[in-house]
Image (cartoon, rainbow, N blue to C red):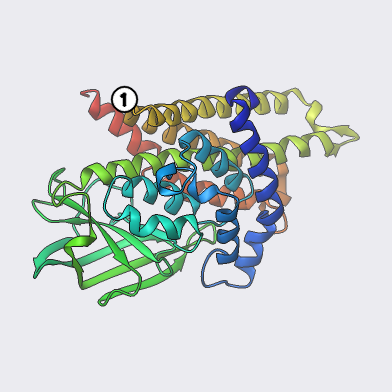
Amino acid sequence: MPLYLNDEQAMLRDTARDFVAEHAPVKHMRGLRDTNDATGFSRDLWKQFAEMGFTGILIGEDDGGLGLGHVEAGVVLEEIGRNLSPSPFLATAVAAVEALKGTAQAGKYFPGILAGETVAALAIDEAAKFRDSVALKAERSGNGFKLSGRKQFVTHGHVADLIIVAARTAGAADDQDGVTLFAVDKGAVGLTAEAERLADSSLAARLEFDGVEVTADAVIGEVDAGRDPLDRLLRAGRTGAASELLGVGGGAMDMTVDYLKQRKQFGVLIGSFQALQHRAAHLYSEMEVARAATLRAQQMLDSASDRADEAVSVAKAQAGLATMLAVQEGVQMFGGIGMTDEFDIGFYMKRQRVLAEMFGDANFHADKLARNAGY
């Protein structure tokens, strides 16, 4: 990994690696799960993220942030993934921040994010699998809008201070135009949330909007032109999820390689078996391809390339596939103990499943790339 980063980014990586490993290792996630924690993450740890400056990585210096880029955000996300750390970082400090940049709401919400006091949730999913369609309706009401409909898989949606909602203000559900993005504050009248545990023990909510009234000030960007901030949110979220997947895959791979170096069968280290060496080498190669694809997406986002969307889809799909290989090989090479709760490798598999689905899985992005290429 050092070859991919400059000196400043490498220093950030070392800082993030030490901090996350100390304060939010896998046992931190286990503790939240075992105590059936109703929040899904630690608010105190989120404030510590802020004290480290992590929450301001993508916020410009004029707004009090560090003014860094997606490469740096990815460095932190990879360590979060490596330690399976439950954190609002991806949704709040990456996706939500990108959606709010350059809008009137930035001044309202950025201070809370910088202080580690504000947690954002993304209410964009409506179906069992991610789709680009938006059906939740936003109808004009007085000087604002009334939101009606449902969203699901809203990570931390039951405790979030800010909920970014994609709503339909014109046209049909599958239309690209006619979408508006709204910033809805916690406790809005008519908004109910039902939290459920996902496969990886994280909490996501089903949200019901029963005539939730918001003022015109809640509009992020412009009415009927919400695709622009929504696309910014999705590009940042997908690239960030790819980075976190790299951490999950890297953590699983490191555990597996260490096991190959320690486990003996018939008095011989299993890492000396050529068949397992070949599989480990194949896995390493696939992870490096995914890392290169993710870094390219990050760099293209940071340079505002007009081809960034394509690179983001490649990164999200490749990271999902490579990490799936990492966790599957890990569980298999660990053998029977890999299926037990005492060993961490199974948690890596569960987290991979959730992250791979987030913002569209590999099949979604392969289809997206093919359609954009005219197939």
Point 57% across, 29% down: residue: 287
Residue 354 lies, in percent from the top left, at 47, 51
Tell me if residue 220 can be seen.
Answer: yes
Vertical arrangement, residue 172 with respect to residue 136, above or below: above
Q: Residue furthest right?
A: 267
For label 1, the SS is: loop
Mark 1 residue type = Arg
Q: Residues within 10 Å of mark 1 (few under 14, many from 20)?
A: few
Among the 4 quarters of the image, the one containing residue 216: bottom left
Image quarter of residue 144: bottom left
Q: Nearer the viewer, residue 21 or 117?
A: 117
* Label 1 sits on residue: 307
What residue lies at 77% left-to-right and 37% top-to-bottom?
258
* Pick the front one: 113 or 172: 113
Is residue 358 shown to the viewer in this render? no
Residue 32 to residue 280: above or below: below
Position of the N terminus by quadrant: top right
Residue 196 in the figure: left or right of residue 100? right
- Residue at x-position 51% and y-position 25%: 292
Residue 313, position as x, y percentages in the image: 37, 33
From what the image shows, is residue 147 above or below residue 338?
Answer: below
Q: Nearer the viewer, residue 60 or 229?
A: 60
Q: Residue at x 33, y 25 (%)?
A: 305
